[in-house]
Amino acid sequence: MRKIALLGATGSIGASALDVIARHPDRFAATVLSADSRVDELIALCARFRPQHAVIAQAEHYLALRDGLLAAGLATQPHAGADALAELAGSDASDTVIAAIVGAAGMRSTLAAARAGKRLLLANKESVVLAGALLMRACAEHGAEVIPIDSEHNAIFQCLHGIGPANERVGKLILTASGGPFLNRSRAELAQVTAEQACAHPNWKMGRKISVDSATLMNKGLEVIEAHWLFGMPAERIEVLVHPQSIVHSMVEHVDGSVLAQFGQPDMRTTLACALAWPERVESGVAPLDLGRIGALTFQHPDRTTFACLDLAYAALAAGDSASATLNAANEVAVAAFLDGRIGFLDIPQVIEATLAGAERLPADGIDTLLAADASARRDANSHISRRERIAGASA
């Protein structure tokens, strides 16, 4: 019986994880559930799954969580705040941690799980982007087992299984991208797109932030950085291909010319079932793949001029030090501003580029330094956004 700490239980990945867990009550038990601020949803999940611990990240909601659990007659222990989240991620309440908190907020708990030697099911790509060297060092030093549950990195994980050191036998890693809702659009067409249009992903059901990242191709840029750290592959041997059907989740090209690919429905339950039971396989609830019905699978190179975020990610990875932390923070701020209607879609890469250009490069040698780079980038990105708002207001 695996004891699962699900960090980010009320999000889309959390829902998929709990669906898989519920299908196998003899194998998996959700012992820790966390949410950011959705107290009522967290209490409802506790009533269904009966975890030992529940954590609400926003500490001001602690009393609502405590009182709600008591009113429901649950023995689940309430906790609140980032420190409690990190402490439980590293505690013996679980042997497996699903890191599904969106953004830099998930970094401390992810590191805590790694330092406790857990099986770490990693969906929080920002932790790897922000602190990849620290995270992978912690995993190596403490014997943590990292299994990525992003569909792309999980595909590569499966394709690399059993071949030994990847750098010796692999020519390149090929990350597939759906292209998002704006595939083949021109810059002129993108100038007036709305947040709702950007969040309408054609294949995947995702949260709003990651949906916008998919639309800008920043999601794929972050995945390039993530693949570099997870698999020890240099950036020049990580390629991105647009694959609109989202059936081939990624590929590995070997030095002999062979290319291995992992196919599957665009459903996160596949990767979660794989990671939870690995190296065994269990039923995930996902429908079988009918390639005859799907018919054609197509691939094309991304338009890196129109969708500039991808090249910004490659540039940040090449710059090293704290540049990836700056990239991630600026992107989070810019996407939030776009979703709030403060800037346009094409302003997102411009805000990120300006923030990167003005950022001080700090050594990526400690969590405090990286968090300082993160905080500085957020201030700078907000300043760039405010400046754009003033200019837009003056010209209106």
Image (cartoon, rainbow, N blue to C red):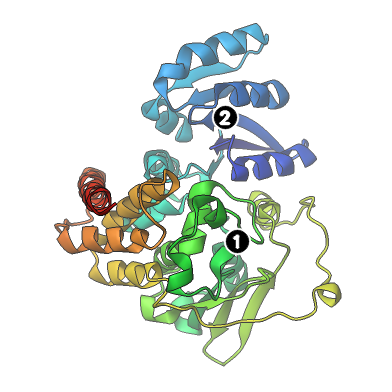
Within 10 angstroms of label 1, few (less than 14), some, or many (20 or more) residues? many
Quadrant of the image containing the N terminus:
top right
The location of residue 109, given as percent across then percent down, is 42, 38
- Tell me if residue 123 can be seen: no
> 329 or 170: nearer the eye?
329
Three-letter residue code for mark 1? Ser
The location of residue 308, given as percent across then percent down, is 37, 71
- Tell me if residue 285 can be seen: yes
User: Residue placed at 36% from the left, 47% from the top?
Assistant: 342
Residue 32 position (above or below residue 162)? above
> 54 or 298: nearer the eye?
298
Three-letter residue code for mark 2? Val
Distance between the Cα atoms at labels 1 and 2? 24 Å
- Counting residues from the N terminus, which is met first, the one under dot 1 or under dot 2? 2
> 88 or 197: nearer the eye?
197
Q: Is residue 103 left or right of residue 296?
A: left
Identify the residue under disc 1: 151
Identify the residue under disc 2: 32
The location of residue 19, given as percent across then percent down, is 73, 41
